[in-house]
Image (cartoon, helix red, strand yellow):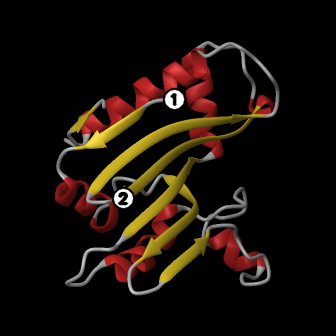
Amino acid sequence: MISLKITDTKFFMNQLLCSETFDNFLLLEASITKDATFIINGHINPSFYSPEEREEAGLCEYTILPYSKLRPVCYQLIRGKHTPVCFKFVLMLSPDNTANVLAQSLSGYSLHDITGIYLNISFQNGQLNLTTGISYTIFSTDRTLEQEWDLLLQKFLFRHNISFDKP
């Protein structure tokens, strides 16, 4: 697990809210505090979609909505002349991307050993931080997968010209 401080908040927010940069993640939850606090639960409400609509939208394999589906909502909640007091986004790798990270890590973990691979984005007191995390279904002292996820995230940020410091 690592924590990174974003050095160009405006650029990062543009990437987060106005581009497809983070669209391959799933949005587990979000909390945005302005004049009120807005909480988004990213779990798919099965009664909202018909089976045909769910298949058409490519959501059959998901229990959590892709960030791309909720990005416009998040943008509408954050935009405005006042900066939010704080916010937190919990993004999660999709099952396919989780499998890819597992294969790259050579850690020996399987999909059944992992509940999720996460990226936490938090803004508070004018500071924007990213924190990585992995939730396991088993106990292990092997941190190979965590180290691989930390490296992959940093490469992802470099590829998208997102600057950061390690506090």
- Amino acid type indicated by mark 2: Phe
94 vs 74, left or right, is right
Q: Is residue 87 above or below residue 110?
A: below
Closer to the camera in the image, 7 or 137:
7
On the image, the x and y values in percent for residue 61 come to: 72, 56
Q: Quarter-wise, where is residue 122 in the image?
A: bottom left
Q: Secondary structure at mark 1?
A: loop
- Amino acid type indicated by mark 1: Met
Mark 1 highlights which residue? 1
Q: Is residue 47 above or below residue 142?
A: below
User: How busy is the neighbourhood of tag 1: few (under 14 within 10 Å), some, or many (20 plus)?
Assistant: some
Mark 2 highlights which residue? 123
Q: Which badge, 1 or 2, comes first in the chain's sequence?
A: 1
On the image, the x and y values in percent for residue 38 come to: 51, 80
153 vs 140, left or right, is left
Whole-angstrom CA distance, mark 1 to mark 2, is 18 Å
On the image, the x and y values in percent for residue 92 come to: 57, 49
Label drawn at residue 158: none
Image point (72%, 62%), residue name: 60
Number of numbered discs: 2
Q: Is residue 51 above or below residue 4?
A: below
Q: Quarter-wise, where is residue 155 in the image?
A: top left
45 vs 71, left or right, is right
Image point (49%, 62%), residue name: 67
Closer to the camera in the image, 22 or 80:
80
Image point (56%, 17%), residue name: 105
49 vs 145, left or right, is right
Q: Quadrant of the C terminus?
A: top left
Image point (56%, 24%), residue name: 146
Q: Quarter-wise, where is residue 108 in the image?
A: top right
Q: Secondary structure at mark 2?
A: strand
